[in-house]
Image (spheres, coloured by chain):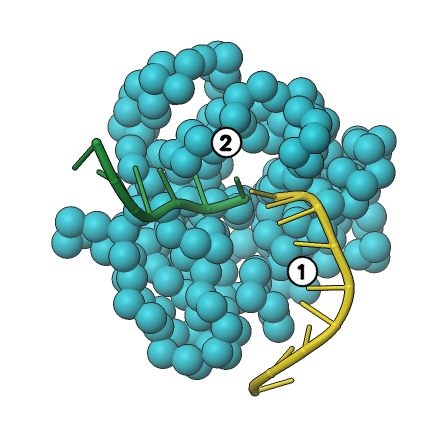
Chain colours: A cyan, B green, C yellow
Amino acid sequence: MEIREIHPFDLTPNEAARLQEELRTRVRTSGEIGEVSLVAGADASYTKSSDEIHAVVVALRCPDLTVVERVSASIRTLFPYIPGLLTFREGPALIEAFRRMRSEPDVIFFDGQGIAHPRGLGIASHMGVLLDRPTIGVAKSLLVGTAAEPEAGRGSTSPILRDGETIGMAVRTKESIKPVYVSVGHRVELSRAVDLVLETARGYRLPEPTRQAHLYANTVRKEGGGVSRQTTLSHGR
DNA sequence: GCGACAG
DNA sequence: ATCTTGTCGC
């Protein structure tokens, strides 16, 4: 994918937070995405004993969700994990992975928050602005806001509230299993984001784009970051 | 000042 | 995120 825009990532935590305040004004929480024929999931994996981050992006065809492309990038990162500044740790590696991907997904799922973030710019929103693509944040826990427990059935939802505002939705993707927290990343509306998450969650708590990215990121890490690209046209292995 | 805190 | 074996529940 062509990266429409880039900015320095070697910033201090204070500078990073300032940049987020600046970029947040460019996030679009309404969408124009029509039919989705290609989705992608992005994630990163790393160990605490190394400063190497292995980022991956997996593209899946819709509606069958067959994996059609996998790319990875392993990069050294010194920025530590700081709640609210995740993008400054995983962003550089993710951007390189996207640069290596030939597919042009209609929407990209990220492991983390979209606008449900202290400064309204979680990793899904931040990357969405840089890539100028529709993105969705699918987090396994909340960073800000609160949400009532959704009903036990699959498909049940409950709004994530913050100061009376709905900033996302807790979504039960699997019966009686802890919900995932969905928030708009960029160029998509919340209702559509929730629909897409439910449409791509098949039998597991995490939707396939995110789940496949998780699996591949772990594979790349365990293999030391050797493979950089892998394209499969009709199989998903 | 204290506790919370995506991955 | 990662470190880790078995184990309780659908």
Q: Which amino acid does label 2 sit on?
A: Tyr
Which chain letter goes with mark 2? A
- Residue lying at 68% horizontally and 36% vertically, measured from the top left: A47
Residue at 28% x, 67% y: name it.
A148
Place residue A169 in its image quadrant. bottom left
Could you say where residue A26 lies in the image, as x and y percent from the top left? 32, 28
Residue A138's disc number: none
* Res A185 visible: no
The residue nearer to you, when weighing A180 against A39, is: A180
Q: Which residue is drawn at 83% across and 55% down?
A: A237
Q: Is residue B6 above or below residue A130?
A: below
In the image, residue A201 lies at what x, y percent?
Answer: 56, 65
Q: Which of B4 and A41 is in front in this view?
A: B4
Disc 2, SS? loop
Q: Name the residue under label 2.
A: A81
Q: Which tag, 1 or 2, sits closer to the chain's start?
A: 1
Whether residue A67 is visible here, answered yes or no, is yes
Give me the chain letter of mark 1. Answer: A
- Counting from the top left corner in percent of width and height, residue A127 is at 48, 32
Nearer-the-camera pick, A8 or A136: A8
Which quadrant of the figure contains the N terminus of chain A?
A: top right
A8 displayed left or right of A39: left
Q: Specify whether A142 is left or right of A199.
A: left
Up the image or down, A36 lies above or below A149; here it is above
Residue A65: which disc?
1
Q: Would you say the residues marked 1 and 2 are in contact, meaning their CB atoms lie under 8 Å apart?
A: no
Left or right: where A37 falls relative to A73: left
Disc 1 secondary structure class: loop
Q: Where is residue A177 in the image (x, y as percent from the top left)?
A: 50, 73
Q: What residue type is labelled 1?
A: Leu
